[in-house]
C-alpha cells in the first residue's frame, strides 16, 4: 500500500497531498500524525527552503526508503531541481511542484527572511530595471498561487505504474 506523508508550512504541500490522496485513494498524513504510514510505501511531500526539502531527513529516519520524494517550492526549474536533488541526496524518484506564496501566511524567521529577499530584489531592480525582476517583486508583494491538480500528472502516472 502507498501512503502520502507531507510536511507543510504555508499549506501548499498539504494541498498537494490532499489532492493526490483524493485522486488515488491513498491515505495522506501530516508527518506529525504519520505513524499509520509506517510499513507502507511512502511518497513524501515537503516544502523547499534554501534548497532543503523540509522534513525529508526525518522521513527517511522514520520510514527508511521512500517510494518517491516531492519537493514543493515557489517556482519550478530544471536547474533548481538538480540543485535540490544534489543538496538533499535524493536518489529516489523525484518530482517538483510549484506552490504558492503569501507573505501574510508567514511568521517569524520565514517572514523576516522573505522580507529581506524582497528588499534585495527591489534593490537589484532599481539598478537593472529588468522587467522580470519587477514582475518577481510584484509576485512576492501581492502573493501568488500555482497549486493545481494539473501539476500532478507525472506523479499520478508514477503511482499508476
Image: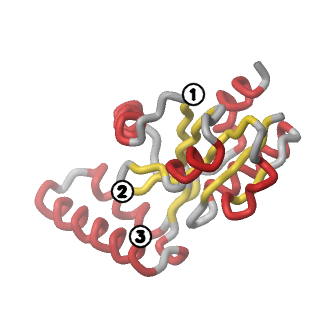
Q: How far apart, in angstroms, are the residues tagged by discs 2 and 3?
A: 9 Å
Mark 1 is surrounded, within 10 Å at the Cα level, by few (under 14), some (14 to 19) or many (20 or more) other residues, namely few
Which type of secondary structure does the marked residue at label 2 adopt? helix
Q: Which residue was labeled with disc 3? A: 141
Q: Residue at x 55, y 58 (%)?
A: 100
| Residue most extreme to the top | 161
Which type of secondary structure does the marked residue at label 3 adopt? helix
- Answer left or right for 86 relative to 28: left
The front one of 39 and 50 is 39
Q: Nearer the viewer, mark 1 or mark 3?
A: 1
Q: Position of residue 103 (x, y in %)?
A: 47, 73
Q: Which residue was labeled with disc 2? A: 136
Q: Earlier in the sequence, mark 2 or mark 1?
A: 1
Q: Position of residue 33 (x, y in %)?
A: 74, 62
Q: Are marks 2 and 1 in contact (CB under 8 Å)?
A: no
Q: How far apart, in angstroms, are the residues tagged by discs 2 and 1?
A: 30 Å
- Answer left or right for 102 relative to 24: left
Q: Earlier in the sequence, mark 1 or mark 3?
A: 1
Question: In what quadrant of the picture does the C terminus appear?
Answer: top right
- Answer left or right for 119 relative to 17: left
Question: In what quadrant of the picture does the N terminus appear?
Answer: top right
Q: Which mark is residue 68?
A: none
Q: Which residue was labeled with disc 1? A: 93
Task: Identify whether 137 is placed above or below 112.
Answer: above
Mark 3 is surrounded, within 10 Å at the Cα level, by few (under 14), some (14 to 19) or many (20 or more) other residues, namely some
Amino acid at each position: 500500500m502507498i501512503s502520502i506523508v507531507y510536511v507543510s508550512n504555508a499549506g501548499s504541500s498539504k494541498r498537494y497531498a490532499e489532492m493526490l490522496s483524493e485522486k488515488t485513494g491513498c491515505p495522506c498524513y501530516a508527518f506529525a500524525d504519520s505513524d499509520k504510514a509506517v510499513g507502507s510505501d511512502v511518497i513524501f511531500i515537503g516544502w523547499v527552503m534554501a534548497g532543503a526539502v523540509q522534513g525529508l531527513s526525518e522521513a527517511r529516519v522514520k520510514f527508511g526508503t521512500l517510494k518517491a520524494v516531492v519537493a514543493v517550492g515557489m517556482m519550478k526549474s530544471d536547474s533548481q531541481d538538480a540543485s535540490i536533488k544534489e543538496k538533499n541526496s535524493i536518489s529516489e524518484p523525484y518530482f517538483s511542484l510549484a506552490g504558492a506564496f503569501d507573505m501574510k501566511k508567514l511568521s517569524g524567521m520565514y517572514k523576516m527572511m522573505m522580507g529581506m529577499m524582497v528588499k534585495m530584489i527591489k534593490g537589484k531592480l532599481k539598478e537593472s530595471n529588468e522587467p522580470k525582476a519587477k514582475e518577481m517583486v510584484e509576485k512576492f508583494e501581492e502573493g501568488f498561487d500555482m497549486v493545481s491538480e494539473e501539476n500532478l500528472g507525472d506523479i499520478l502516472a508514477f503511482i499508476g505504474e
